[in-house]
Image (tube, rainbow, N blue to C red):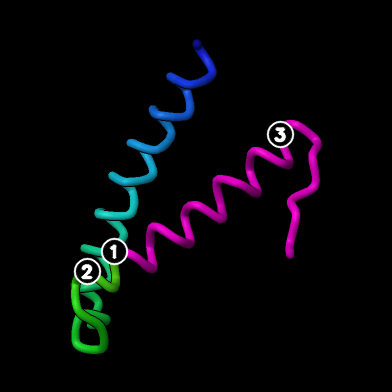
Amino acid sequence: MRRAEEILEIGEIVDDAADRLATVLERSGAGELYPSQTLREIARYELDLAALDIACLTFGTPPSRT
């Protein structure tokens, strides 16, 4: 059960980081190019990929790039 709790905790951290990153992007002018929700979705997607890469590097499993 510990593993599921860790995954949920990572999800919360990534959500928070995506919101913060989107806020920074909005302040830097990206808000003029994309709506706020789109920036948040882009940030979340990129952070999900980064989390996957980190997990693969940590545990030695290469990511599947299909």
Distance, label 1 to label 3, CA atoms, is 26 Å
Few, some or many C-alpha atoms within 10 Å of disc 2 (few <14, some 14-19, many ≥20)? Answer: few
Distance, label 1 to label 2, CA atoms, is 5 Å
Q: Is residue 5 above or below residue 18?
A: above
- Give residue 16's position: percent from left, percent from top: 28, 44
- Give residue 24's position: percent from left, percent from top: 25, 65
Residue 22 magenta: no
Would residue 46 appear left or right of 58 to someone viewing this image?
A: left
Nearer-N-terminus badge (3/2) = 2
- At horizontal 75% and vertical 54% (from top left) the residue drawn is 64
Q: Give the main secondary structure of the magenta stretch.
A: helix
Q: Is residue 57 above or below residue 21?
A: above
Residue 55 magenta: yes
Q: Nearer the viewer, residue 20 or 36?
A: 36
Magenta stretch, residue numbers: 41-66
Residue 37, label in figure: 2
Q: Name the residue under label 3.
A: 58
Would residue 5 appear left or right of 61 to someone viewing this image?
A: left
